[in-house]
Amino acid sequence: MENKNAYQAELFSNRLSKNYKQLKKWARKNRVTCYRLYDKDIPEIPLCAEIYTFLPYDIDTKFEAAKHYAMINSAVSENRPEAANLLAQEASRTYLHLYLYERPYEKDEEEENQWLKEMASAAANVLGIPEKNVITKTRKKQTENKKRAQYEKQENETSIKGVVFEQGQLFHVNLSDYIDTGLFFDHRPLRAKVREQSQGKRVLNLFSYTSSFSVYAAEGKASYVESVDLSNTYTEWSKENMKLNEFEDSDRYNFISTDVIHYLYDREKEADHNQEFKKFDIIVLDPPTFSNSKKTDTMLDINRDWCELVRLCSKILSEDGILYFSTNSRKLVFDEGKLPTNAICREMTQQTIPEDYRNTKIHRVWEIKFNKEY
């Protein structure tokens, strides 16, 4: 067993080292301090590894962050004497979020823990970070009774929180208290696209989680951004992310903690009966695959409900508006025949897969417009 663990640790180290070498230059160039390094690249090592480098604690604005990383990049590219010290300081603020996918077979818990410990040690060595900076978790297969687990707080003695930089924006992340950390990397390209298109637009972010899309829309000079999520915890987290990026105008940035399905039905009625209802120019619809929160009487199954959600969005979308619909479900059958007859759909999945994702099936994305003259 020890020989097998050592062999797999070596395989894992080699792949991590290769991936890290390829991605770290890309990350610096694109001002990205958190990204995916490994995701079940080797089948017998079913791990996902994501790197997070926190900003120094005395930096709390986008301008300061950009200046800080420009200084590091310049020192590194010019091989200046201070580069080694700057990189060492950066390593001390770097963490690896390492989670094990539940295996399809039973394995002794003690053996599994020892195996995971050895993989974590190997990863720390490759990245040049302290072993205590590797946070390990297990992501179990989601039965209906476990669907809420990724959003529920975990029991931890200490919380590991910090601020990361992504393409010019700042985000609070929490590496210890939940299965997920507060920022989904796979939508980084789509966030950038929304930012490019948002100037002067009214933007609606549904199932907003911690509102990374909202931050990007605000950065793109949207005239109004509304973020909707059932969780009070994530709504407060969203407000902190917007504040961190200096978007605090309550007239322009609105947060609603409510069930998204109820929200859409209410907005549909409002749009039908109020000629002054202001529709949205961009809607981001990125729902979970399944949700059965105790806080609402609705149960969402995206494989069943996706077409109704799209229909409801069409009712509050402006004449030239765009709906971006995304799903992580591989079982969803996207049948345009189930949509309103004036729907114009374009799948854009391949254009939204990030540089750091080996798994090109991480999500699917469609751009949907509605022909008002139909």
Image (tube, rainbow, N blue to C red):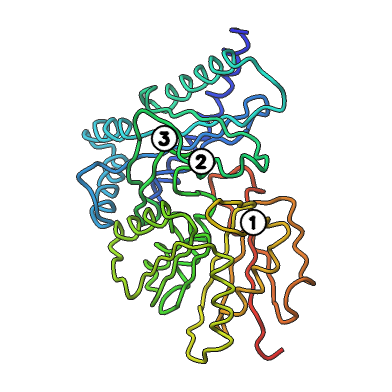
In the drawing, does residue 225 fall left or right of residue 162? Answer: right
Residue 36 - label? 2
Q: Residue furthest top?
A: 2
| Badge 3 or badge 1: first in the primary sequence | 3
Tags 3 and 1 in contact by the CB under 8 Å rule? no
Q: How many marks?
A: 3
Residue nearest the observer in this picture, 147 or 196: 147
What's the residue type where badge 1 is placed?
Met
How many angstroms separate mark 3 from mark 1 (CA)? 28 Å
Give the position of the C terminus as an image quadrant.
Answer: bottom right
What's the residue type where badge 3 is placed?
Ser
Residue nearest the observer in this picture, 287 or 72: 287
What's the residue type where badge 2 is placed?
Arg
Q: Which is closer to the viewer, label 2 or label 1?
A: 1
* Residue 32 locus on image (x, y percent): 40, 48
The residue that mark 1 highlights is 299
Callout 2 environment at 10 Å: few (<14), some (14 to 19), or many (20+)? many
Q: Which is closer to the viewer, label 3 or label 1?
A: 1
Callout 3 environment at 10 Å: few (<14), some (14 to 19), or many (20+)? many
Label 1: which secondary element: loop
* Residue 371 locus on image (x, y percent): 67, 84
How many angstroms separate mark 3 from mark 2 (CA)? 17 Å
Label 2: which secondary element: strand
Residue 176 - label? 3
Residue nearest the observer in this picture, 127 or 248: 248
Query: In the figure, residue 107 lies in which quadrant?
Result: top right
In the drawing, does residue 195 fall left or right of residue 3? Answer: left
In the drawing, does residue 169 fall left or right of residue 270? Answer: left
Q: Which is closer to the viewer, label 3 or label 2?
A: 3
* Residue 54 locus on image (x, y percent): 33, 41
Residue nearest the observer in this picture, 37 or 205: 205
How many angstroms separate mark 2 from mark 1 (CA)? 31 Å
